[in-house]
Amino acid sequence: MTDIWMGISPGPLTTRVLAMAGARETIVKANLRADPAHPRALATLLEAVALWQGQKVRAALCAKDRDGASDSTLYRAAFGDEGGLLYSLDWLPALPPRRRRHRDLAGVGDFNDLRQLLLFEVAR
């Protein structure tokens, strides 16, 4: 079994989440509130996906900077926790903003930048 790869990209209006099992299978694609309502929300989300799928989640928080001055308080809540056996969480610099495409048929928007970051990380 291979790990689940998850990208989390906080923004001023929403936090985008993309989880993939391998290079081609998307298992979670979501737009959530910009800031979670609870400080353990991100850890709980990562644990839930790991438990649901029965595989470790390797997550990347894709934010502008690592010092907590990102668009979201998500960064500050995310790195007080090691993750343990269920998940790991690393920081990746967000790709520069680009012109957004129209929303796809699923209605949650364009996740190509997160998909690209995850695939580059899988290839390492």
Image (tube, rainbow, N blue to C red):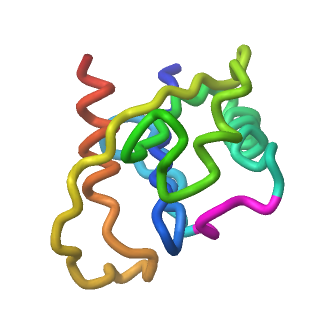
Residue drawn at x 37%, y 46% is 64
Q: Residue at x 66, y 62 (%)?
A: 35
Residue 91 is drawn in which quadrant? top left
Q: Nearer the viewer, residue 74 or 20?
A: 74
Q: Tell me where residue 4 appears, x and y as whole percent.
A: 52, 33
Q: Is residue 38 above or below residue 99?
A: above
Q: Is residue 113 magenta?
A: no
Q: Main secondary structure of the magenta part?
A: loop
Q: Residue furthest left?
A: 99
- Residue at 45% x, 34% y: name it: 66
Q: Is residue 5 visible?
A: no
Q: Nearer the viewer, residue 30 or 52?
A: 30
* Residue 57 visible to the viewer: yes
Query: What range is drawn magenta here?
Result: 32-37
Q: Quadrant of residue 123?
A: top left
Image-based side of 36 in relation to 75, left or right: right
Rendered position, 46 above or below 12: above
Q: What x and y, as percent, mark residue 22? A: 38, 34
Q: Position of residue 6 (x, y in %)?
A: 49, 40
